[in-house]
Amino acid sequence: MNWNTGYTPWYQTQPAQQGNGINWCQGIAGAKSYPVAPGQSVMLMDSEGDVFYIKSADASGVPQPLRIFDFKERKPEAVQSGNFVTRDEFEKRLQEVLNGKQSVSANEQQQ
């Protein structure tokens, strides 16, 4: 039995993504005009500034309010060296505790 009725289903598609999979837009106007499939969300990086947008549409295709976010690069925090002891200092304190010259509770009170 041949079920081919000559009907070709229509599928809504998004524009072809190029590059590394990041969706880019030009300003808020570009984000507002970017097409989104019903029931989907898309993150759009603004090519004009440190902003990204999340655009969504409900199941019937009605656009939801555009969400706007600012971002900035974070630098790794530097390690503070004042809160650490050297290996030699550690070994010295360990021997004092083990030999009974310094109690553990006395060391805790100094902090």
Image: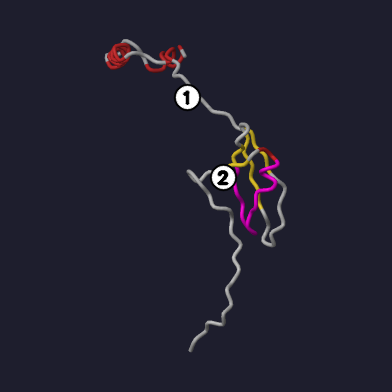
Where residue 105 appears, as percent x and y from the top left, is: 41, 17
Which amino acid lies under the numbered mark 2 shown in the image of this protein? Asn
Q: Is residue 81 left or right of residue 6?
A: left
Q: Does the magenta stretch include residue 18?
A: no
Is 73 in front, or is 88? 73
Is 94 in front, or is 70? 70
Residue visible at 53% across and 82% down in the picture: 4
Residue visible at 54% across and 52% down in the picture: 16
Label 1 secondary element: loop
Report which residue position mark 2 lands on: 23
- The residue most toward the front is 6
Is 54 in front, or is 79? 54
Q: In this view, does 78 lie to the left or right of 42?
A: left
Residue visible at 56% across and 45% down in the picture: 23
Decide: few, some or many residues near mark 1? Use Cα within 10 Å; few <14, some 14-19, many ≥20: few
Q: Distance between the residues labelled 1 and 2?
A: 27 Å
Whether residue 49 is situated above or below residue 28 in the rendered picture: above
Q: Is residue 30 left or right of residue 108?
A: right
Span shown in magenta:
29-44
Which amino acid lies under the numbered mark 1 shown in the image of this protein? Pro
The total number of labels drawn is 2
Where residue 100 appears, as percent x and y from the top left, is: 30, 13
Report which residue position mark 1 lands on: 76
Where residue 70 appears, as percent x and y from the top left, is: 64, 33
**Rendering quarter of residue 91:** top left
Q: Is residue 30 magenta?
A: yes
